Amino acid sequence: MTIIQVAVLGITAVALAAQLKPLRPEYSVYLILAAGLTVGFLGISRLQLILDTAEQIGAYIKVKNIYLGTLLKMVGITYIAEFASGICKDAGFSALGTQIEMFGKLSILAVSAPVLLALLETLRGFLA
């Protein structure tokens, strides 16, 4: 699917959800959730291209695969947390959405900790 098709899907889902919201608010949330999941899965289909590009970049700059894997995990955590948070906020549960965002940030920090330690170890090796 192209970006135009995805944009039309999103706009159509929002227009339908806006029409449903006064009548059946729960159905509008379900509609937006289904549209969001569809767009998310379509985005995942592009993941192979991103992985191939990341491997080529890693080959050019001699980066360990673990660092690229960590970077991809961080991007994935960010997208998932933002998606879930947005759905919660759209449904009127902004407190839960904010908590999901906080958990996502803490998860990114936890995933990146080994990379930070490796960087500090490298710096210590240069200074010693």
Image: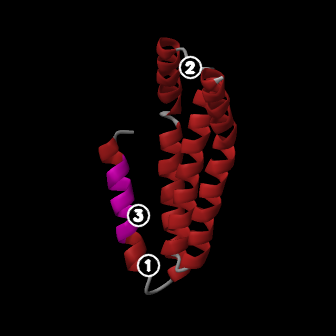
Q: Nearer the viewer, residue 120 or 52?
A: 120
Classify mark 2: residues with Cα within 10 Å, few (<14), some (14-19) or many (20+).
few
Return the mark for residue 63: 2
Q: Dot 3: what SS? A: helix
Q: Amino acid at mark 1?
A: Leu
Q: Answer with mark 3 or mark 1, whichever residue precedes in sequence.
A: 3
Q: Residue at x 54, y 51 (%)?
A: 78
Q: Answer with mark 3 or mark 2, whichever residue precedes in sequence.
A: 3
Q: Give the residue pinned by disc 1.
A: 20
Q: Nearer the viewer, residue 16 or 110?
A: 110
Quick check: marks 2 and 1 in contact, CB under 8 Å?
A: no
Q: Amino acid at mark 2?
A: Val
Q: Dot 2: what SS? A: loop
Image location of residue 101, percent across then percent down: 57, 63
Q: Residue at x 53, y 26 (%)?
A: 51
Image location of residue 125, percent across then percent down: 65, 22
Q: CA distance from mark 2 to mark 1?
A: 50 Å
Return the mark for residue 13: 3
